Image (cartoon, coloured by chain):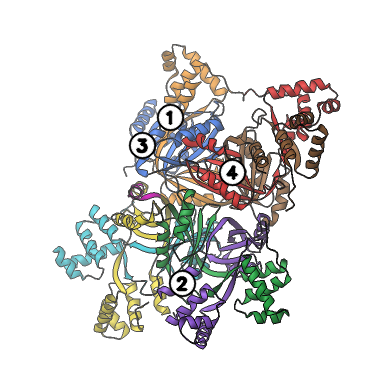
Chain colours: A red, B brown, C blue, D orange, E yellow, F cyan, G green, H purple
């Protein structure tokens, strides 16, 4: 459905940026034996085409005092409230991910908290949103994998 | 427990990098009225201290043909197999997140696939790992929020 | 309870029609060494007796862009609303089957959609019917069997 | 992905066949003011293109003594057995539909039986297939909707 | 807490009545080498003491057209309604047993019906009682054991 | 399916026996203005026809020290073991009812015990039967209804 | 976070008090070769520091007629009612423990009752609290371990 | 069932000891206007009769670094292993309570841990016991009530 066409050069540029978003374009250019201008043009094109939506810093949440991760499943009173509830959830910075899902939950969230008590406060914030009927929480004992890079490389190798 | 101490300048640097990891250090320096060298030193210190673990590109998975997201809960035959199974899961690039969890699942994963059929193949890969007893899948109908930046800003504002 | 009596000839006629509803009556007649008029009379009798309720075309939904199948379990606020809700469901063409069931759901539906997003829209239509309390969705990863002909042949062989 | 292109005439022909698969081509031709040959060619093309996969008789199962419908969810010991188990299920004519599904079941079936006792026998046949770990049954109290024609008309009206 | 004291003769009388409530007292007397008057007095005492609460006929429900048995779990809106709802249930003769239970249901019933359709009607009667929030049904495929006599004999042998 | 035909006189006889299985035939005869011989013949016929399968004493289990009732759901390792397991269950007199069921359990039992500790012993007996995979128990807090007479009268009034 | 610092002497004093809260301070003093005054001062310090919050008698509930233990999970209509409901629960002396929990329940309680009937009354008291939506009960068949002393010794050995 | 008989004086003594197990007997004697010898005799009698089983120190677990509480439900492979598994559990000091329960779990435990990671280790210890099939964990967000004294006073007031 209108999938953006990337060629080999694009893939190689992305492959380098995935590993280090701060790598200078001149380094990419040298490594691929193309001009830095080309790199610039290609990246710009991929940004304008919406392939590259931005970049994000990977911080160590534990070192920042946020070692508690939980998944919270939300039951709504009625799915017509989905949009409204998601807007309210969007005001809670401790919710880093939210999905509309099939199965028993209407909305499924990932939260990061400082500790058990903080988690309780965040869960109560979610519970208190108008239209939220009930929540169920599953606590992470260890975040074993959190890595999109393997997927990205896999996508570009396969294309 | 040995939490890394960050001062106001560190916070302001991180605040700028969170929004754009590719912002040149000279821009950060100018904006904070400090020298580019200071920015460099501070970032290096935060990298060495493990606060900054890296950066990652935010790509548009839909445009790359990966519009299908699912959460897969894994039941193990025995939790003594947890480490072994996680190593096998780590070889499947389509699993972007995996947690050891409380509640009914032993391991809880997030997967990204091209479509229903591809998702089936990935779920079967998980099911076929030795020690995996059963899996249960919950499908995302819409990824409404996926944003760590709000949390990061919140952490630095609060500190 | 007033079960319609079919004889061997009826069975043989049905056996041929099951495989191809468009087979000409003259072909059936020849194959069974009876007159085309007899075939006509028998089929008419089975239609009037309500044994044959019609025929339906088997189209390839995937080729028509409808590759997404899901089962949706519906919880009602009160079963006195069952009839009303079923009438509303009947206005949603994407629901091809609906049952009143025992177990945890009040009504259980099969839906066909174009893709995940379309499925979400259909599920929301169901959720928004007055009297529907909650829904739970199970997604088909592959329709492995969809074949009433085996059953029909089995019925006629056994009778 | 390689969706077959149908034009208005094809849609109109399908619209007539959906309501009655036995309607003579001459009737279709007259109704659409085209030649019977054109109808023939178009239908043939749609059959060869795989759009029309066949036709099926709609019989009254109640009148034939098959008034009992149930959905059976199957848990496998291991999903690597899926294909093998589906082949075994395919030998049980009372299973009219089978899906590989997300959620708690590996395979989800629809069965038609004569009565409670017959249903028990069929469920035991499923339970006895090698590789089947457990089954869960949900019984239909009433088949309220079973109608693909609304969907088909909707598809052709929309295209 | 005030358990009624039965002696050996009482046990032996009960043992005979358990097997056949219509056995004449003279037969019991002869078999136990006591007078018929004694049997009479003992039975009367056990009736007055509330040990024997009556007798019931064991009919063949299948032969009477009631071959369908189901267990229905009832969720109430509030347990303060328990007494009220049980009075309403008591007006539905097809409910032969009802318990207030721990676990997920508030009230748990056994029903006997003529067939699937009749069962649906009874379940709807239960669902329509004011204060009933939801019901869940589990259908019996075969009543394999229904025998209190073994227990009774066991009680008297043990005492 | 070969339902036994009962006439009005049979119904009236049953109606009287249901209330008191020990009512003398002469009383029934007088009440219905028929001869005692006729009562005898009719009852005999209903016994031989299998309509009347026997009679059972209604004892007060609480007074006998058996005040604890529980429902136990049994999961089998494989349903091919159903018959074998039911034979073993049949040796435990504290199980008064057992059904093969749809839904999550394979077999569903009713047990009567002296107290919590005795119930534990009975549940362990069930758990220890070869082929039993797991059990789940639901405890009765009060047996509110246990009355087949209402149903029987209802059947005979309706016929 | 401000953990109270205990030294070896404190640990040894606690170790002795854990086993017998009524042990005279002179005995502790002799055993540890310190003065009774020192024991007094240390215990006082640990009481003032909040390490020792008191002592409790271990009675035999069975001998006192309270042999029935159950866990009751409480679902609230809304978590904003948590504090209010906990205050009400606090007025029911038969609830000895109550937690705000993750997972399916909002509040999870331990109750002690005299028998099944008393337990029913207590569960109904909980159910009747305003804001309580539903409860689910799990009954203890045997309290196999109830011993904090092992943990306390373990804590002091480890420190 | 051989319930120990306590008189008013016993109740008053217990009432005082419940509040403070270290209260000197001379204080109790003075308060109840009886001799210290009587207090001594009565307490001894209640200890020998098994009413008083001991006393336990109430420590502040949070201050000791044990702020994490969870309930762990254990599924056994077979209940014949119950005794064996409980012996193994008894070697894990972090399990302070364990019950054999009805409902979905075989054994239900309360654990106290230092933090999420420590809880994971304890859960893994439980999971690794031979005969343990699976565990499910529910985490306490706040221990709102933990008080047996209200119950004890209630028992003695009522007696």
Against F9, residue B19 (above or below) is above
Magenta stretch contains residue G139: no
Report, in whole angstroms, how far the alpha carbon at label 2 lies from the one at label 3: 56 Å
- Which percent across, then down, holds residue G81? 46, 51
| Quadrant in the picture for residue C91 | top left
Against F53, residue G106 (above or below) is above
Q: Quadrant of the C terminus of chain E?
A: bottom left
Q: State left or right for residue B14 relative to residue F134.
A: right
- Which percent across, then down, holds residue G63? 48, 77
Q: Which residue is mark 1?
A: C55
- Which percent across, then down, holds residue F78? 55, 56
**Please, which chain is the residue tagged with disc 1 on?**
C
Residue at disc 2, secondary structure: helix
Do marks 1 and 3 share a chain?
yes
Q: Nearer the viewer, residue H87 or A136?
A: A136
Residue at disc 1, secondary structure: strand
Q: Are marks 1 and 3 in contact (CB under 8 Å)?
A: no
Q: Which residue is mark 4?
A: B137
**Please, which chain is the residue tagged with disc 2 on?**
H
Do marks 2 and 1 share a chain?
no
Part of the protein shown in magenta: E120-134
Q: Are marks 4 and 1 in contact (CB under 8 Å)?
A: no
Can residue A104 be spotted in the picture?
no
Q: Which residue is mark 3?
A: C84
Residue at disc 3, secondary structure: helix
Q: Which residue is mark 2?
A: H153
Residue at disc 4, secondary structure: strand
Mark 4 vs mark 1: in front: 4
């Amino acid at each position: 459905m209108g999938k953006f066409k990337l060629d080999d050069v694009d893939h190689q540029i992305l492959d380098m940026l995935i590993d280090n978003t701060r790598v200078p374009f001149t380094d990419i250019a040298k490594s691929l034996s193309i001009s830095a201008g080309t790199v610039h043009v290609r990246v710009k094109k991929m940004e304008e085409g919406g392939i590259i939506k931005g970049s994000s810093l990977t911080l160590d949440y534990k070192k920042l005092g946020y070692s508690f991760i939980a998944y919270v499943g939300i039951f709504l009173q009625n799915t017509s409230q989905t949009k409204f509830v998601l807007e309210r959830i969007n005001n809670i910075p401790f919710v880093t991910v939210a999905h509309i899902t099939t199965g028993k939950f209407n909305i499924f969230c990932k939260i990061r908290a400082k500790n058990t008590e903080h988690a309780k406060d965040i869960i109560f914030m979610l519970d208190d949103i108008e239209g939220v009927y009930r929540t169920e929480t599953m606590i992470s004992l260890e975040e074993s994998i959190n890595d999109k890079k393997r997927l990205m490389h896999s996508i570009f190798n396969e294309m």
